[in-house]
Amino acid sequence: MTALGARVSQAPAWLLGVVPLVLVAGFVALFAMFGGPGLDDRRGPPAEELAVERTVLEPGVFELTVRNDGPDAVTVAQAFVNDAFVQFSGAEEPIGRLEAVTVRLQQPWVEGEAYEVGLLMSSGGTITHEIPVAVETPATGLSFFGLLALLGIYVGVIPVALGMLWLPWVRRIPTGWLRLVMALTIGLLAFLAVDATLEGFELAGEGSQAFGGGALVLVGAAVAYLALTGVSSWLTARRRAAAAGGASGATLALLVAVGIGLHNLGEGVAIGAAYSAGALALGAFLVIGFALHNTTEGLAIVAPVARTQPSLRLLAVLGLLAGAPAVLGAWIGAAAFNSSLAAFLFGFGAGAIAQVIVQLAPTLRDEEGRLLHPAAVSGILLGMATMFATGLLVSV
Amino acid sequence: MAHLTRRRLIAAGGLGGAAILARGGTEAAGQHAHQDAGTDGPVHAGHEGSGHADFRDGRTVDHAANGFDPHELVRDFDWGRTTRMAGGRVLREWELVAIDREIEVAPGVRFAAWTYNGRIPGPTLRCREGERLRITFANASEHPHTIHFHGIHPSDMDGVPGQGAGQIGHGGKTVYEFDALPAGLHLYHCHVRPLAEHIAKGLYGAFIVDPRDGREDADELVMVMNGFDTNFDRANEVYAANTIPFAYMHRPIEVAHGELIRVYVVNVLEYDLINSLHLHGNLFDWYPTGTSPRAAEFTDTVMLCQGQRGIAEWRFSTPGRFMFHAHQSEFTELGWQGFFDVR
């Protein structure tokens, strides 16, 4: 062993771990100090990019929150609406990278009409944003949050609770039938996972790309999947009730409820944002559609506890875990909608559901240990068909 | 709860029955304009706005930094330098230099322009019918350019590629020489491809040939109607007469009532098919191309395609402030509007 090698081996481990970090920091500092030696300045003019993150409409005012998601600072020089320059306030100073500012444009607008809002940059570039249907943004007062809570309860909590009323039925059915119901549940969840992923990517494409765009959906999914896996193994270990090939019924039900809850959080965000943007018409049809559609989620929660004696308290907790996040999501979506956040939450919901499916899968095994036996496949397909069909009620 | 999108929800609500959830607060009643109650004009809450479309807080560009001011340009006629030729005929000469120059086309907005003599529009060249004209053109721009005059001249003086000196490269020089014909209002511009870009960047100006007997004394103005495509999408972001949007809103053109006003109007606007001029509270005599002594029309609105021009004449009978602007509202509210301040 050389002298250097000997000294390195004597150094404390933490020091060896820190050395590369210190060197990187020093290198970055020197590089910045000398202005990137050997490298030319950027070729071409500065790239000015702004993403509109939030639009608020008040009488006579369009308020836009924009974020600089380009590499260079952006200076807003003028603003226009529908091909006419307008007075505005905000964005007096250059907007730094990833910085968000709010500009308020003075515009006498008419309800129900479409507007194109534009910002003219100092470089001459323009950023335009369409307001497809102008509707006054609701004031975010107590009654507003109350209304959104009611909406969340209608489309989240009540349908889930109703679906859980299938519990007495699933208790009485034979084991083979129960497997079919579990397969049905997996089909429902698979549909939701795919749908949430697609919705997440759609939202990610709308807003600022600086925070990762579509990658946020995948990051959200990975975080939820890993986190739930960790929670699940912790719960299983704690209860010491690991049945062969799967977690206990209560643990499974809890995981299903959490997964569906996270999914409903994302849906709540979409509903809240749509409502505050005036794109959501609160009709009986909508609520009825959701009731039918989401009732199946309740079935998914109670199926794993069919062979146990769950307390009413546990059932209430499960129902609230699955449904109540819709209320929270609606609040977030209405008060602080951000497409990057929404994309992340949709990905989060999808990841949670994927994890739940993995947890549920062993319960499908029949006496011969087969997973995808004819009954299971039929159940999964039936679940997906159910979601598709009831989904049409919402999407018509 | 699943696959809900905002777009789908619009449709869902449309088919839905009675809303079972009352909308909180005030129910919007049908269509109505959102305007601040108690104010007469359009909404400019928080601003002492003029009620007209305008730049932020009524800010103006830095005319000094630009090197030209539309308030001076509007009455600036360049008669050149004259000498007598053998036989007594007048030889009138100008020197034009193509210069690349960044100008502020709207407060805070920089535009990499190409100019004649550092200004947009280039100098308003003015002469009398029948004179001999000699324009020395030097190209100090990084790009090849020409000067193509409208009017009557030999083909080698046409200022287009392949004719005469053709296009003049960086550092090059040429002389355009021809007779001042016919009397009227003309224009000049660069004719190098891509043509749209060479015009849109600012290489143009008015060219006036006075009739031999002159015209009636008048307060004379020149307005070159133009615009700028600052984001290069082949559509203009700003419009104006004499380059700077809203310039004559911020500082109206002062004229005297009862006095004959003569405006030389030239449209060079690129990308848009047409442009127009509209005068408030008055009508004017319109002389298309200024070539006939008789007015073609008594009107308050004329429409011009690119390259089309004419002379407008009228007298304000009363003092006051009268607007003039393009009668394409889009151009108007993107900068092409102004006031006459009639004293």
Image (spheres, coloured by chain):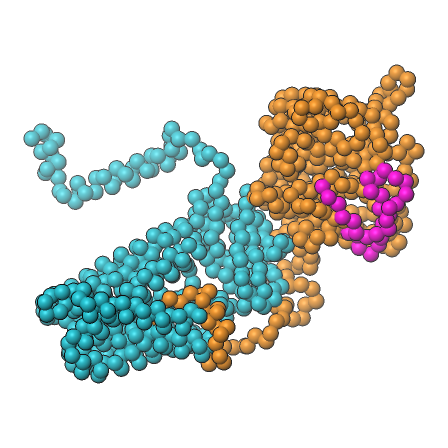
Q: Which chain is represented by cyan in the image?
A: A
Residue projecting furthest to the top: B86
**Of A356 and A333, the residue lying toward us:** A356
Q: Residue at x 49, y 45 (%)?
A: A48
- Within the magenta stretch, is there residue B285? yes
Q: Residue at x 69, y 21 (%)?
A: B165
Q: Position of residue A210 (x, y in %)?
A: 40, 50
Q: Position of residue A220 (x, y in %)?
A: 31, 58
- Within the magenta stretch, is there residue B58? no
Residue B87 shown left or right of residue A324 in the figure = right
- The magenta segment: B278-306
Residue A340 visible (yes or no)? no
Residue A316 shown left or right of residue B172 in the figure = left
Quarter holding residue A27: top left
Residue projecting furthest to the front: A374
Which quarter shows the N terminus of chain A?
A: top left
- Name the colour assigned to chain B in the rendering: orange
